Image (spheres, rainbow, N blue to C red):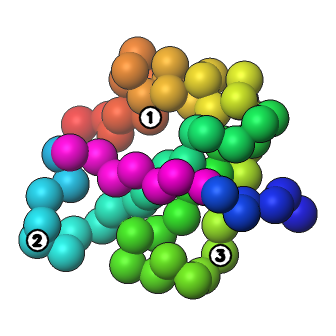
């Protein structure tokens, strides 16, 4: 389990204030990227190695996870 003390959480500017499905990400911790549900800040947190997080973001940008229409 990673020590998330000092995590600085950021929510996407695109999430808006409508209470939608949002996540927050902390990238300021050494060796770990943390992700949590913005509606349940005391709940579970996922952690990723920085390289795995970068690969995930690249997949999102490349449309790897887009639904087939």
| Residue of label 3 | 44
SS class of the residue under badge 3? Answer: loop
Question: In the figure, residue 49 lies in which quadrant?
Answer: top right
The percent coordinates of residue 7 (x first, y second) are: 61, 55
The percent coordinates of residue 42 (x first, y second) are: 57, 83
* Callouts 2 and 1 close, C-beta under 8 Å: no
- 65 vs 44, left or right, is left
| Residue of label 1 | 65
- 23 vs 26, left or right, is left
Q: Earlier in the sequence, mark 2 or mark 3?
A: 2
Quadrant where the N terminus is found in the figure: bottom right
Task: Report the disc number at residue 18.
Answer: 2
SS class of the residue under badge 2? Answer: loop
Q: Residues within 10 Å of mark 1 (few under 14, many from 20)?
A: few
Q: Earlier in the sequence, mark 3 or mark 1?
A: 3
* Front position among marks 3 and 1: 3
Separation (CA) of disc 3 from disc 1: 23 Å
Question: In the figure, residue 20 lies in which quadrant?
Answer: bottom left
The percent coordinates of residue 3 (x first, y second) are: 81, 61
Q: Residue at x 29, y 46 (%)?
A: 12
SS class of the residue under badge 1? Answer: loop
Q: Earlier in the sequence, mark 2 or mark 1?
A: 2
> Where is 23 relative to 39, above or below?
above
Separation (CA) of disc 2 from disc 3: 22 Å
Q: Residue at x 20, y 45 (%)?
A: 13
Q: Residue furthest front?
A: 6
The residue range painted magenta reads: 7-13
> Where is 17 relative to 25, above or below?
below
């Amino acid at each position: 389990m990673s020590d998330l003390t000092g995590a600085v959480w950021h929510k996407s500017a695109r999430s808006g204030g409508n209470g939608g499905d949002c996540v927050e990400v902390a990238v300021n911790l050494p060796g770990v990227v943390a992700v949590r549900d913005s509606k349940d800040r005391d709940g579970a947190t996922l952690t990723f190695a920085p390289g795995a997080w970068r690969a995930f973001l690249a997949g999102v940008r490349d449309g790897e996870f887009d639904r087939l229409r």
